[in-house]
Image (cartoon, grey):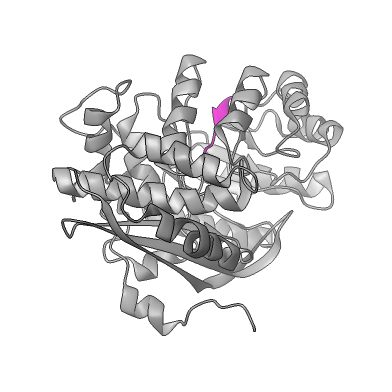
Amino acid sequence: MTRIESVRADCFRIPLPTAVADSTHGTMDAFQLITVRLTDSDGGTGVGYTFTVGHGGTAVRSLLRDDLSEWLAGESCDEIAELWQRMWWRLHWVGRGGVASFAMAAVDIALWDLQARRAGRPLWRHLRETVDWLTPADSPPTVTPYAGGIDLDDPIDVLLERTQGRLESGFRAIKMKVGRPQLAEDVERVTAMRELLGSDIPLMVDANMRWSVDEAITAARALDGLDLVWLEEPTAPEDWDGHARIADEGGLPIAAGENLHSVAEFRELITRGGIAYPEPDVATVGGITPWLEVARISAENGLPTTTHGVHDLHVHLLAAIDHASFLEVHGFGLEQFIAAPLAIGDGQAVVPDRPGHGVELAWDKLASLGQKTTPE
């Protein structure tokens, strides 16, 4: 039995190449990357990471350093689901989501990476071989990516120009932001986007929780007829009944989940009928272990599973399941610190075949940015 030898946690501030904005978070010029480097008693290594949209990263790192790293040392690397449950109960008084789920995610991802590396298998294949409800496969199924732009403040000409560039780089599906001060502005922008894309390219819109339930129903009805795949996060994430009303009265399929940080929250949203496309984020829902549980519940309810961010990890998870929907490609500029970023070709994501998740971070380059620290 191999055991955890050491756990190192770090937090880096990653400047965005271009500042971005949405209807809730405002303008963002950087994000925080929180990493875990795990070593086992045989010298094997695993890497996990999570992120924030600019704030709270040092709290995640502190939880990892002060409450998990020393406690994890000496624990078995093999029973990942059991260890996840023990982390959950260790942190439940201050957790059950939130910062605790972010910290647990980084550890859980590192453990699965370590296990898949030791088995000499890419993560997607390792999951299909070891998780009882998944089916083994010799080659990964098709994973279809979409470009998840953060473009609410872009003038229409800039929005369309950037979209054209994404199409030229190989994307065949696009998502754009909505939630402008006037609904007529959203309708005008989405109409212009649909005219650019034509009828064959899937288009999604994302409101980032901007509206009340009634406002969301009005917006959905106004946008209906523009051939949208989904309306994402139309209202507050924990309003289960509100989501069900929007889905029932608005006329558009609903995607949501990037702001849900536990399996229990997803179960509520799914069973209340408030969602057509569950969207768990492996980096914020607690890691691969709970991500797979959300995917299992989605499958039981006949729903496809989609993703949010961290596409270099999610490409493996979508390749591991048989009810995958689109892969959101939006790395917050992290690709400049990855040795082999996700490749897109002719509208499809290339699923890596390297052992583990295959994400090799440029540690020296990250270190040159300096650690994100809290003032004394």
Magenta part, dominant SS? loop
Q: Is residue 42 above or below residue 144?
A: below
Q: Is residue 366 above or below residue 155?
A: below
Is residue 279 one of those drawn in magenta?
A: yes
Q: Foreground: 149 or 245?
A: 245
- Taking the spot 71% from the left edge, 58% from the top edge, the residue there is 25
- Taking the spot 80% from the left edge, 29% from the top edge, the residue there is 217
Q: Where is residue 357 drawn, in percent x and y?
A: 28, 50
The magenta stretch is: 275-280
- Quadrant assignment for the C terminus: bottom right
User: Does residue 95 appear to the left or right of 141 in the view shown?
Assistant: right
Q: Foreground: 78 or 140?
A: 78
User: Does residue 82 appear to the left or right of 233 in the view shown?
Assistant: left
Q: Where is residue 278 drawn, in percent x and y?
A: 55, 31
Number of numbered discs overlaid on the protein picture: 0
Q: Is residue 208 visible?
A: yes
- Quadrant assignment for the N terminus: top left
User: Does residue 28 appear to the left or right of 124 in the view shown?
Assistant: right
